[in-house]
Image (cartoon, grey):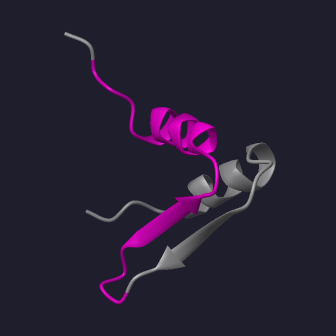
Amino acid sequence: MRRDPRPMVAWCERRVRNPWKAVLEPDLTQVFWFEHSDDAQRFALRFFPFKCS
């Protein structure tokens, strides 16, 4: 199942202050690139949170 990238792009446009980009790979996988690791970590926690047990 593919995830709709529009909410992720909108989140980046509102919250990421450093350079970033989203790229659509040939297999239609959306890849996000962040210049600063802090932005990447916040993005990952927002869209791919860890489940606690």
Identify the residue at image location x=80%, y=48%.
17
Image coords of residue 9 (percent x, y): 64, 60
Identify the residue at image location x=28%, y=21%.
51
Residue 30 belongs to magenta span? yes
Image coords of residue 32 (percent x, y): 51, 63
Image coords of residue 27 (percent x, y): 30, 85
Identify the residue at image location x=32%, y=26%.
50
Residue 49 belongs to magenta span? yes
Identify the residue at image location x=52%, y=37%.
41
Q: Which residues are magenta?
A: 26-51
- Using the image, determine if residue 8 lies above or below residue 37: below
Side of 9 where 46 appears, left or right? left
- Using the image, determine if residue 15 lies above or below residue 8: above
**Which quarter of the rendered picture does the C terminus lie within?**
top left
Q: Residue furthest left?
A: 53
- Using the image, determine if residue 52 lies above or below residue 32: above
